[in-house]
């Protein structure tokens, strides 16, 4: 179960209040060596802190681990795509996403009820696992002279805190943003989006584009297997839909017009519009319309560590950040792009051959494509007489799919086994191969 961390804020106290908060929570030794801070004795407080290495270490640890964590937590959900984060994964290393398909309607019949009512109807359940795949850390160094400067003025301590935290926070936040965008790129490269080709947006056609987006937004509110790559029957209310767009197209669209297309007032819609600088390497991608469950992003670990180098008189601080970065293939997701996306051709290897019954071998289909089309293909087997002769999935990449053909030990000698591969969304792209069954 993921939990959203509580957002905390660092009160805008003056320097003495901050320094005394650290002192009050410090050890007895620290309190004996370091005086109560006032607006007039900041330098005296600093001299006491710096005069003894143990006191200096305790001060820095409190400053980073106490104050720093508050600042990091308060800013953790501020990257442009942060609203898609699901919270903190408190236990375990993976999330199992489960989808239970629709129950089927059955005809009421008292005559058959006696025989049928105790029979089991196993639900159609599909699951996807999302695992920890990001374990990074960010590092910053604090030198003794930084500490000395911190106690020259009342604002110096705040400057030190800000410099340390900004260095760690900005690196972690920006990295998180880039990885979240990359999830969109990888999803498109795998052909998982339902893609809609649009003309290059301009002032002349922008209203037509908004109308097109609205049309698909309306369609997502109805149960359909069309808009998710798992082909499960699902839907997305407008209150669950997010529209992600790059800056170039956002500049052309009147927000009031777009809000009206989603049947929302401007203030409500602005929470559903997500602006990003670009879609990375997805040439032509302009808008993504996704359900709020599309991104599966969880924080797993956020931990500070520190170590002092006595020879160099500096402290290294580390922010360790672990995440689950993943995408749900059950969630409706549409990509509007100007690029032409198509499967243009399919080739099979091997194309033919003679194989003994009771054996098996792999068959690989290679897809030729333009843009980022959905690469789903239907594999069929014909010509077999044995139920032991089967075609099973092995693996796939961005442009290849591999299946294993197992020839039953009782398959008729001379049988012509035909394997056909056809693109589901571009049916003109198809290929076939025939294999003859020979005797062992």
Image (cartoon, helix red, strand yellow):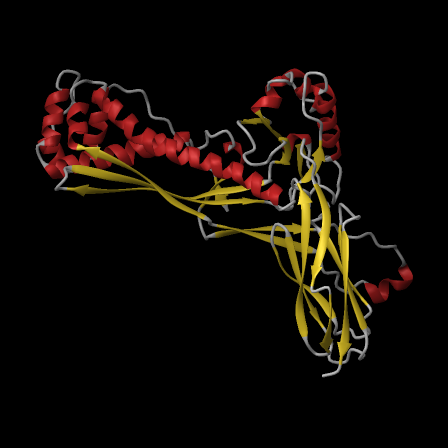
Q: Is residue 248 left or right of residue 377?
A: left
Task: Determine the residue positioned at 76% across, 56% down.
Answer: 431
Q: Nearer the viewer, residue 435 or 119?
A: 435
Residue 270 position within the rendered picture, expressed as x and y whole percent measured from the top left: 59, 22
Instruction: Farthest residue to the right: give it.
Output: 111
Q: Nearer the viewer, residue 214 or 35?
A: 214
The relative height of residue 9 versus residue 5 in the rendered view (above or below) is above
Q: Nearer the viewer, residue 81 or 63?
A: 81
The relative height of residue 111 versus residue 333 in the rendered view (above or below) is below
Task: Determine the residue positioned at 72% across, 16% down.
Answer: 204
The relative height of residue 425 versus residue 198 in the rendered view (above or below) is below
Position of the C terminus, as image quadrant, is: bottom right
Task: Determine the residue positioned at 9% across, 33% down.
Answer: 32
Residue 360 position within the rendered picture, expressed as x and y whole percent measured from the top left: 67, 73
Among the 4 quarters of the image, the one containing residue 374? top right
Q: Is residue 110 left or right of residue 81?
A: right
Q: Is residue 299 left or right of residue 118?
A: left
Q: Is residue 28 visible?
A: no
Q: Is residue 438 visible?
A: yes
The relative height of residue 346 versus residue 235 in the rendered view (above or below) is below
Residue 290 position within the rendered picture, expressed as x and y whole percent measured from the top left: 63, 35
Q: Is residue 94 left or right of residue 191?
A: left
Residue 415 position within the rendered picture, expressed as x and y whole percent measured from the top left: 81, 74
Among the 4 quarters of the image, the one containing residue 23? top left
Q: How many marks?
A: 0
């Amino acid at each position: 179960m993921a939990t959203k961390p509580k957002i905390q804020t660092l009160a805008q106290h003056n320097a003495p209040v901050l320094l005394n908060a650290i002192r009050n929570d410090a050890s007895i030794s620290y309190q004996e060596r370091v005086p109560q801070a006032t607006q007039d004795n900041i330098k005296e407080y600093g001299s006491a802190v710096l005069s003894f290495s143990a006191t200096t270490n305790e001060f820095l640890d409190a400053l980073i681990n106490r104050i720093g964590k508050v600042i990091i937590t308060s800013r953790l959900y501020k990257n442009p795509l942060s609203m898609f984060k699901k919270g903190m994964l408190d236990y375990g290393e993976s999330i199992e996403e489960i989808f239970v398909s629709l129950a089927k309607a059955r005809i009421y019949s008292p005559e058959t009820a006696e025989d049928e009512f105790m029979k089991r109807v196993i639900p159609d359940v599909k699951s996807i696992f999302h695992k920890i795949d990001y374990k990074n850390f960010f590092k910053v160094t604090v030198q003794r002279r930084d500490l000395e400067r911190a106690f020259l003025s009342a604002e110096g301590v705040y400057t030190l805190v800000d410099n340390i935290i900004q260095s760690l926070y900005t690196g972690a936040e920006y990295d998180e943003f880039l990885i979240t965008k990359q999830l969109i790129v990888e999803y498109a490269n795998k052909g998982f989006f339902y893609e809609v080709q649009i003309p290059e947006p301009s002032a002349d056609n922008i209203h037509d584009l908004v109308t097109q987006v609205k049309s698909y937004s309306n369609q997502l509110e109805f149960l359909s297997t069309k808009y998710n790559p798992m082909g499960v029957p699902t839907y997305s209310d407008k209150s669950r839909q997010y529209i992600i767009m790059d800056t170039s197209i956002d500049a052309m669209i009147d927000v009031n017009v777009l809000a009206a297309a989603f049947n929302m007032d401007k203030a409500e819609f602005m929470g559903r519009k997500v602006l990003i600088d670009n879609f990375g390497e997805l040439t032509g991608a302009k808008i993504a319309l996704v359900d709020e469950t599309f991104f599966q992003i969880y924080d797993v670990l956020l931990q500070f560590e520190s170590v002092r180098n006595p020879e160099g008189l500096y402290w290294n601080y580390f922010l360790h950040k672990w995440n689950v970065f993943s995408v749900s293939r059950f969630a409706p997701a549409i990509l509007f792009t100007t690029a032409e996306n198509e499967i243009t051709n399919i080739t099979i290897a091997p194309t033919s051959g003679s194989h003994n019954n009771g054996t098996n071998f792999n068959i690989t289909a290679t897809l030729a494509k333009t843009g980022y089309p959905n690469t789903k293909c239907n594999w069929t087997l014909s010509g077999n007489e044995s139920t032991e002769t089967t075609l099973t999935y092995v693996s796939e990449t961005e442009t290849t799919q591999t299946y294993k053909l197992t020839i039953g030990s009782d398959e008729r000698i001379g049988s012509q086994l035909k394997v056909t591969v056809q693109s589901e969304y571009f049916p003109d792209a198809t290929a076939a191969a025939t294999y003859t069954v020979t005797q062992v």
